[in-house]
Amino acid sequence: MLILAMPIASIGLSWLGVDAVQWGLMREMAATVLPGYTLTTLALILMVAVGVGLLGCGCAVLIVMFDFPGKRWLTWALLLPLAMPAYVTAYAYTDFLQYSGWLQTTLREVLGLQGRMLPEIRSTGGAALVFIVSLYPYVYLLTRAALLERAGNLLEAAKLMGATPLDRLRRVALPLARPAIGAGIALALMETLADFGVSSYFAVQTFSAGIYKAWLALDNPMLASQLATVLLVFVAIVLWLERRAQRRIRFASSKTTLAKPAAVAPTQLHGWASVLACAGVLLPIVLGFAAPVLVMLHTLTSSGDDASTPVLSALDWAANSAGLGILSAAMAVSIALVLATQQRLRPSSFGKSVTQIVALGYAVPGAVVVVGLLLPVLWLREFVPGTGFGAWLTGGIGGLLWAYMVRFVAVAMQSVDSGFTRIPNSFDDSAKLLGAKDGAIWRRVHWPLLRGPVAAAALLVAVDVMKELPATLVLRPFNTDTLAVMTYQLARDERLGEAALPALALVVVGLIPIIWLSRQLNKPRH
């Protein structure tokens, strides 16, 4: 497991070899680009935090506390933006809202005016809008679960005491959901900090974009590692806030386990109130999923035969993406099973520490992982000139799979761990009393009950890998283009008609876990 922790360790060790010249570059960076990166990143995460908090919490409250037409369909449709990679949403909105896009062109023709009709979408505010409509489902999911699990009894008691719906919302529902709202916001901020596609395409100077610029454009790995260190500080703060919120969620849940939680009795809305509630829930679905899909479909169908992406090329990219996803899923699930099984059958403080280190991987941005993997190769080549060490890392899929494991083993661990928590320890004790060894217990007791969580883990990892952009962009072997990489490169070259096909393919792939998750949401609660 030290292999999975090595990228972070190498970034920390990079500070030990800083010489006077590098210190001078760092001081120059602190006086020039670092303040801009910091202010832009802070402004971005502040806008995203407020936006996803209001949008996700508002949707959860409307779904849980009120009843209106279309609610059953809208409950799971609110998850659809999770299927849309944020960088794909950015490309779609740029094509639609930019100066030469359909909307501004139509407005100028209808109104007979000249010049720009809308603010520039390629800006910090535009990036924040993209992240808000793409990431609010994190807050919606956790807030909805918190209200359903803990608010029923208290909301019913408040209703019997004569509290109005607004009072029940303000004094009961929101205080109970506050830890879940905080955890959802933290997850959205980690995705924002890890982003490269949106910030690069919109020319927003965030730390992730700065890391790639320092490494690839300025050819300064040390500068990239120092920017990665600062980005890790942001991630550590957000991760600490998320863990703190999760602990508060568990603490709040433990206080209500003495009695079976009552179902929340929604208030029936009529007339204009029901229309406004339905429109309020439908708006983020349109902004985060329907509108980008329609724009991409229009771009694909109107681009012409010469500008459209050849289907055979798209199939090659899809095959590469699927191959990497399946291989990574198999590796990540295997590692997660080994760690979780060892901790279940032979628990130890060391195993717990290893599991916690692995769990941090998903919070580490892809830009940081890339820098952490490539730094040791550069160091060895500097000390041993002419060595071929690292060729497997930079010229094959070895380095790419390593980066995927660093980031996505945590996803598999979460699903496998949740599967183990549903297996009572009494099953293990009974098997041991019957003389079963560890291998037999795992094969005959654990595995039959873990097939569902393992399949879910493999699905989630495979989809995450297929949509992953930063590490794939840098570490992929030559002639191994994926859907994510080609979508980014074609859109960067302003060939949005050609980018539409791989972008829509990524959306279709992303719909697979959303369908599975929506089925879980629609299962009756017991």
Image: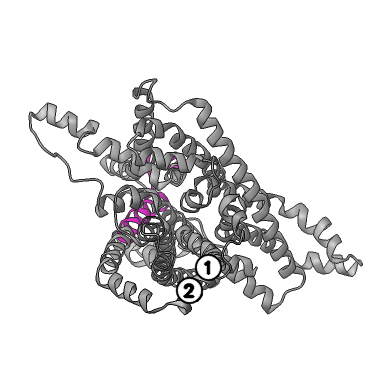
Determine the secondary structure under disc 2: helix
67 within the magenta span: yes
Mark 1 or 2, nearer chain start: 2
Residue 493 position in % (x across, y down): 34, 38
Q: Nearer the viewer, residue 522 or 486?
A: 486
| Image-based side of 447 in relation to 273, left or right | right
Relative depth, front residue between 312 and 297: 312
Q: Quadrant of residue 500?
A: top left
The residue under label 1 is: 382
Residue 288 visible: no
Q: Along the line of sight, which residue is nearer the eye, 136 or 176? A: 136
The residue stretch that appears in magenta: 49-74
Q: CA distance from mark 1 to mark 2?
A: 14 Å
Residue drawn at x 65%, y 74% is 352
Please name the amino acid that badge 2 sits on: Ser
Disc 2 designates what residue?
A: 14
Q: How is the image coloured?
A: one colour
Say left or right for 454 vs 223: right
Q: Position of residue 205 (x, y in %)?
A: 30, 58
Q: Quadrant of the N terminus?
A: bottom right
Residue shown at 48% from the left, 73% from the top: 14
Image quarter for residue 222? bottom left
User: How many discs appear?
Assistant: 2
Name the one closer to the observer, 294 or 43. 43
Which quadrant of the figure has residue 61? bottom left
Q: Which mark is residue 256?
A: none
Amino acid carrying label 1: it is: Glu
Q: Residue at x 38, y 66 (%)?
A: 172
Residue 360 to residue 94: above or below: below
